[in-house]
Amino acid sequence: MAITILAVDDEPDITELARFHLGRAGYEIRTAASGRAALELISRRRPDLVVLDLMLPDIDGFGLCEILRRDPTLATIPIIILSAWATREARTLGQDFGVLAYLTKPFDPRELVTLVNRLLQPAPPGGTAL
């Protein structure tokens, strides 16, 4: 079964860019344009990783992080924030929610692919992938 990544962003250009580059890297990509749509997709099939924008039309990215982290069956899903909101406070709050990485828009799609590859690699024996 392919590794599944959920890209959540209300800008179709961003989700299509993620779909194209991560798809070329061999990942199955699903997309959602809102927090509620993301939760619906997650309830149907748990993704292996979430790429998440913070500024969404209904449930913002931090709200979605909080919902995922409170559910023991979803709490370990790795999350990468991909947002134009590039403040120190946003990064700190992301760390508080266990976000593994924070990329700011505009972004280099190759950097996203490299980061996803690194986060989804199995940890070496006796060590961690990061």
Image (cartoon, grey):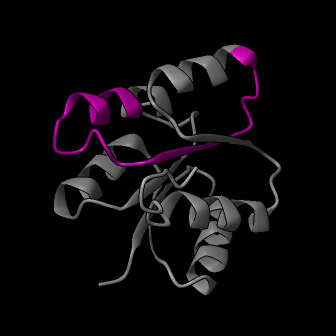
Residue 102, magenta (yes or no): no
Along the horizontal axis of the image, is 1 left or right of 3?
left
Q: Is residue 71 found inside the magenta-colored segment of the image?
A: yes
Say which quadrant the N terminus sits in.
bottom left
Residue 109: horizontal and vertical position, in percent? 75, 65
Q: Nearer the viewer, residue 104 or 11?
A: 104
- The relative height of residue 2 versus residue 10 in the rendered view (above or below) is below
Vertically, is 41 above or below 28?
A: above
Q: Is residue 11 left or right of residue 39?
A: right
**Residue 69: quadrant of the picture:** top left
Q: Is residue 70 visible?
A: yes
Residue 64, x across and y down, in percent: 38, 34
Residue at 80 percent across and 53 percent down: it is 107
Q: Is 123 situated left or right of 45 in this image?
A: right
Q: Residue furthest top?
A: 89
Which residue range is magenta in the image? Answer: 65-88
Q: Is residue 67 above or below residue 37?
A: above
Residue 101: percent from left, percent from top: 61, 41
Q: Nearer the viewer, residue 126 or 43?
A: 126
In x, y percent, where is residue 60?
Answer: 47, 30
How many marks the image carries: the answer is: 0
The one nearer the camera, 56 or 71, is 71
Q: Residue at x 48, y 51 (%)?
A: 127
Q: Residue at x 43, y 48 (%)?
A: 78
Say if residue 13 shows up in the picture.
Answer: no
